[in-house]
Image (cartoon, helix red, strand yellow):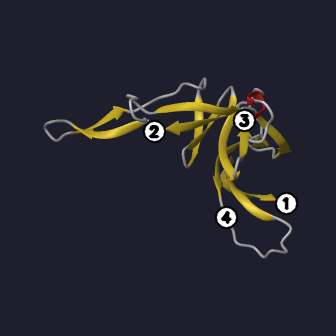
Amino acid sequence: MFKLARDRFGNILLEKHTAYRTSTAPIDISVVGDTVAVADVMKSMSLVQYTQAEEGEREPKFEEIARHYQTLWSTAVAPIEENVYLLADAEGNLVVLQQNITGVTESDRKRLQPTSEIRLGEMVNRIHPIVIQTYTETAVSARALLATVRLPAFTLKIMYKT
C-alpha cells in the first residue's frame, strides 16, 4: 500500500506505507472495507486484513486472515456476499469460497472452504459484484457480472445465486 506525500518543495511522491507478501504472483484483488481478497496465479486465493498503526507502533500492517489451500491458477476474484467469494481459474472453472468465521479452532477460521464449483468452460478475466433489487419471492438473484474473452467478441455473463 502506498500513500501520497509531499516533499519540502511541494512535489507529490508515492511512499510505501505497508506491504504483505502472501502470494507468488497476484493477478487480481478485490477490496471490501479493510479486507483484501487476493487471487494468485498459482496459489488460489487469500484474504488479508489491513490494520492501522496503533499508539506506539511505527506503521500499519497487513495480516493474512484466511486462505484457500488448494492449488488453482486463478484469474479473478470478487465478493458476492459477506464472507463469500467467487473465484475464477484459467481452466474455465468458478469456485465459491466461504470463510469459516465460526470455526472451532483458529486453523478452521483461517481456511476458505469451497461451497460449490461450476464449470463455465471459458476463462473469466474479471468478476464484478453487483446487487440487483428483486422481489422477496424471487428464487434466484444476480450477484456477479463475469467478463470473458471469446474471440472475436467480449462476453458478459451474470452469475446467479439461489
Residue type (three-letter) at the residue carrying disc 1: Thr
Label ID, residue 150: none
Q: Residue at x 85, y 60 (%)?
A: 162
User: How many marks are shown on the rendered structure?
Assistant: 4
Q: Residue at x 58, y 40 (%)?
A: 29
Question: Which residue does the numbered mark 4 point to in the structure image?
Answer: 131
User: Mark 4 near mark 2, Cβ–Cβ under 8 Å?
Assistant: no
Q: Is residue 148 visible?
A: no
Q: Earlier in the sequence, mark 3 or mark 2?
A: 2
Question: Which residue does the numbered mark 1 point to in the structure image?
Answer: 162
Q: Earlier in the sequence, mark 3 or mark 1?
A: 3
User: Mark 3 near mark 2, Cβ–Cβ under 8 Å?
Assistant: no
Which of 75 and 49 lies nearest the eye of the viewer? 49
Q: Position of residue 118 (x, y in %)?
A: 84, 45
**Mark 1: secondary structure:** loop
Mark 4 and mark 2: Cα distance apart in space: 29 Å
Mark 4 and mark 1: Cα distance apart in space: 14 Å
Question: Which residue does the numbered mark 2 point to in the structure image?
Answer: 52
Q: Position of residue 49 (x, y in %)?
A: 57, 38
Question: Which residue does the numbered mark 3 point to in the structure image?
Answer: 90
Residue type (three-letter) at the residue carrying disc 4: Val
Compared with 119, 19 (above or below) is: above
**Mark 3: secondary structure:** loop
Residue 94 in which image quadrant: top right
Mark 4 and mark 3: Cα distance apart in space: 26 Å
Q: Earlier in the sequence, mark 4 or mark 3?
A: 3
Q: Counting other residues with Cα less than 10 Å from the Cα at mark 2, is it few (<14), some (14-19), or many (20 or more)?
A: few
Residue type (three-letter) at the residue carrying disc 2: Gln
Which of 105 and 75 lies nearest the eye of the viewer? 105
User: For the residues carrying marks 3 and 1, which lies nearer the camera in this image?
Assistant: 1
